[in-house]
């Protein structure tokens, strides 16, 4: 049959194996917001396809934490990661309710970085160069994050009061200069991999940047958390403000660093490593000249609001910044997965989709569930079938 979206002759199924359009459905309108505000070409797959390539059950512009930060997980692993994230946050908050604030801070600081490490291992993101990839992403991020934390300690006081109240007098250093330095440090490691042709699409850059960003945040937050032990396991302070700060440490801050640096690194890969025809797919968001100021703005805003706003309002604004960064990262990941749609020309042999367990022709998308096959872990391409899941419900976005 002929796909009404890409006009290719494709096998009968729920989805087009070339462009991922749901067969039997009308072609959706372009994302006018992306085209008007960010200059995304109306003919690009980002503007035309409203389903997220890594998870067709969701729209591209939906700021979902797990599917955005860990896009190459199959559906079964997605559930496990969601449970782990929620369960880990519950443990952190339980420690706060028990007034074991330093232990809660340490647990919160390692929550998202630990999930990121498990993700790297689960999807085999290292390919055949594990040492190089780990060294310039996770290890680089953790080492520079720890060093950054010690630098922060030299220019401003630390300890329990740092987490319990903000200090407006440190706006220049903690709100502007140090956050700018942190962006440079988080990005520097992944850029070492930019010249390697093996890592040649935007998804690679986004993965490396996200790994460096979350390891940096984890390293810095762990150092600050251990500083609070100087006041004992039960430092002074009301439970309410501490719980808000624990939520900052466990979710808001690492997600902001991970999503922002992942999207920024993906923009560099899109500009310098992607095929020429794909380099305009993200519009202004995919050009480093725009991406660098946007990333700096997000990180700076996250730092300043912690200094200047009441603690609960600061958390709300931080979560809003997280949503912006996650949508940006999703757009980068989406484009990275769709790059292969243009490159693949012939159908490969029939394979079993590791996401839904149904047979599909090897091309770009699964004809049953619509997931981008490039989003599935490399180590599972020959895995035995899993229990089938139904095709996704229509998604907005």
Image (cartoon, rainbow, N blue to C red):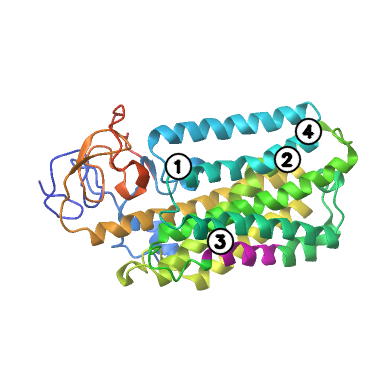
Q: Please give the name of the residue rendered at 38% of the width and 53% of the height, measured from the top-left corner.
A: 334
Question: In this rendering, does residue 376 appear at all?
Answer: no
Crowd band around label 1 with a 10 angstrom C-alpha radius: few (<14), some (14–19), many (20+): some
- In the rendered image, which residue does mark 3 sit on? 136
- In the rendered image, which residue does mark 4 sit on? 240
- Callout 4: helix, strand or loop? helix
Crowd band around label 4 with a 10 angstrom C-alpha radius: few (<14), some (14–19), many (20+): few
Q: From the viewer's perspective, is residue 252 above or below residue 78?
A: below
Question: In this rendering, does residue 100 appear at all?
Answer: yes
Question: In the image, is 144 to the left or to the right of 356?
Answer: right
- Callout 2: helix, strand or loop? helix
- In the rendered image, which residue does mark 1 sit on? 122
Query: How far apart, in angstroms, are the residues tagged by discs 2 and 4?
Result: 18 Å
Query: How far apart, in angstroms, are the residues tagged by discs 4 and 1?
Result: 37 Å
The magenta stretch is 179-190
Q: Please give the name of the residue rendered at 45% of the width and 58% of the height, measured from the top-left corner.
A: 129
């Amino acid at each position: 049959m002929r796909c009404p979206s890409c006009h290719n002759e494709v096998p009968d199924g729920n989805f087009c194996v070339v462009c991922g359009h749901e067969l039997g459905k009308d072609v959706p309108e372009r994302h006018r917001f992306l085209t008007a505000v960010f200059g995304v070409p109306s003919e690009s797959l980002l503007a035309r396809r409203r389903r997220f390539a890594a998870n067709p059950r969701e729209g591209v512009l939906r700021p979902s934490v797990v599917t955005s930060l860990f896009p190459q997980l199959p559906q079964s692993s997605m559930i496990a990661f969601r449970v782990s994230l929620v369960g880990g946050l519950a443990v952190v908050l339980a420690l706060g309710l028990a007034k074991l604030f330093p232990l809660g801070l340490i647990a919160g600081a390692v929550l998202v970085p630990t999930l990121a490490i498990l993700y790297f291992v689960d999807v085999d993101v290292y390919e055949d160069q594990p040492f190089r990839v780990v060294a310039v992403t996770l290890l680089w991020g953790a080492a520079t994050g720890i060093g950054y934390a010690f630098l922060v300690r030299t220019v401003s006081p630390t300890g329990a009061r740092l987490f319990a109240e903000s200090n407006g007098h440190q706006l220049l250093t903690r709100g502007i200069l140090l956050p700018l330095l942190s962006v440079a440090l988080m990005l520097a490691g992944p850029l070492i991999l930019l010249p390697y042709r093996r890592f040649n699409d935007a998804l690679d850059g986004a993965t490396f940047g996200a790994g460096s960003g979350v390891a940096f945040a984890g390293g810095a937050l762990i150092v600050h958390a251990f500083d609070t032990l100087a006041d004992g396991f039960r430092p002074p302070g009301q439970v309410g403000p501490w719980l808000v700060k624990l939520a900052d440490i466990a979710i808001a801050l690492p997600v902001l660093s991970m999503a922002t640096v992942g999207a920024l690194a993906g923009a560099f890969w899109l500009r310098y490593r992607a095929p020429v025809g794909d380099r305009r797919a993200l519009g202004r968001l995919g050009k480093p000249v725009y991406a660098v100021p946007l990333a700096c703005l997000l990180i700076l805003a996250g730092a300043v609001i912690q200094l200047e706003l009441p603690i609960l309002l600061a958390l709300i604004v931080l979560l809003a910044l997280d949503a912006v960064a996650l949508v940006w990262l999703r757009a980068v990941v989406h484009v990275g997965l769709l790059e292969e749609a243009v490159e693949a020309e012939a159908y490969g042999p029939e394979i079993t989709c590791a996401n839904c367990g149904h047979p599909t022709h090897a091309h770009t998308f699964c004809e049953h569930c619509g997931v981008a096959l490039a989003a599935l872990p490399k180590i599972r391409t020959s895995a035995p079938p899993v229990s089938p899941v139904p095709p996704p419900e229509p998604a907005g976005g």
